[in-house]
Amino acid sequence: MAIPHVDVQAQYAPLIPELQEAFARTLETGRFIFGPEVEAFEREAAAHLGTVDAVSCANGTDALVLVLDAMEIGPGDEVICPAFTFYATAEAIARRGATPVFAEIDPVSLNLDPADVERRITGRTKALMPVHLFGRPAPGLAGFGLPVIEDAAQAFGAGGIATSVASTFSFFPTKNLFALGDGGLISVNDAALAERIRMLRFHGSAAKKEFLYVGYNSRLDALQASFLRIFLRHIDAWNVQRREAAARYTELLDGLVETPVDEAGHVYHMYCVRSPERDRLAAALKAAEIGCAVYYQPPLHLQPALRYLGYSEGDFPETEKAARENLCLPLWAGITEEQQSEVVSVLKRASGLVRS
Ligand SMILES: *Cc1c(COP(=O)(O)O)cnc(C)c1O
């Protein structure tokens, strides 16, 4: 039985009639840019997250750039982030002309290690940018007296998120809260910052005639907002389903590989195991037509575009080891027990071969 890594269609299939209704509504009104669907989604997302405001934009990468810009972080400034994350985290910092400063991860949570973050703070550090990797809430970094920008692209609805200055989200179709295309959001706890981000996403203007900043054109379109409003009503249930599926994997795997240590509020954007035999296990899954993914190899400090930062191999041993060992198994809200058993039995057979 072929099993995809993520089955996005299975998640939205039961909602197709509602999605078609939303599409029809937009066709009727002819409002494709901004308008009531976008405003309603922003209100509903802020209410769901419990933040002062939420500003939508074109994607999760723009969300990061917009926040950094609104906070006037740019050349000469440093922002601390992990190297074990999607490239966009550091790219957004570099895009602003600021310097990404990498810090080491904790080998169990795969999130930033606060002690290492502390060692890398300098007089130029303007913000800390933790990533809630694979849906696991990153440890709070508020104690360092610096603004925290959370890259929550993989963690909508995770416990303890969106409590800092600003958190960013991506609605890329494989994320736990997704659009049927691209989309992004910034949840903000400071009304003035939210206003500035709202202007920046539309050419630095509030009134279309007066342009206060050099901004961007980065909008979530009305159709995506209308779909997201539907998905937002299901995200809590989906996150519970993800947690249940993760618990089932951990039970079925029974110590065969290193399984993620559970934590309250983890929403399992990915179910990520670790093994020194990772490449062989991945090959076995592939041969059995089972989708899986290996993330962030090479990690960001070794990426060609960021070579100018001057890092080299060996600088972040835990990050590099995690990149060599991680394997993300098929997971989505609604994966069946049968599919999970199949994944685990392929891994068990492959491990048998490994040992003989
Ligand atoms: C997906 C992702 C992004 C970027 O989101 P896009 O919508 O693809 O631009 C940024 N950071 C992390 C951690 C992500 O997983």
Image: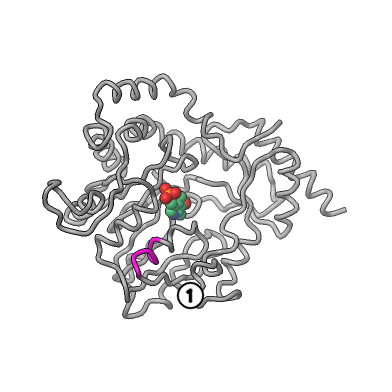
Of residues 143 and 314, the one nearer the viewer is 314
Where does the magenta region start and end?
92-97
The relative height of residue 302 versus residue 337 in the rendered view (above or below) is below
Of residues 238 and 309, the one nearer the viewer is 309
Residue indicated by mark 1: 308
Residue at 84% x, 49% y is 353
The relative height of residue 218 versus residue 9 in the rendered view (above or below) is below
Of residues 350 and 13, the one nearer the viewer is 13
Q: Residue 153: within the magenta?
A: no
Report if residue 171 is visible in the image: yes
Of residues 317 and 93, the one nearer the viewer is 93
Q: Position of residue 99 (x, y in %)?
A: 39, 72
Q: Quadrant of residue 320?
A: bottom right
Q: Amino acid at mark 1?
A: Tyr
Report if residue 154 is visible in the image: no
Q: Position of residue 42 (x, y in %)?
A: 26, 40
Q: Is residue 136 left or right of residue 281?
A: left
Q: Residue 94: within the magenta?
A: yes
Q: Does dot 1 land on a helix, a strand or a loop?
A: helix
The relative height of residue 270 versus residue 28 in the rendered view (above or below) is below
Residue at 23% x, 47% y is 53
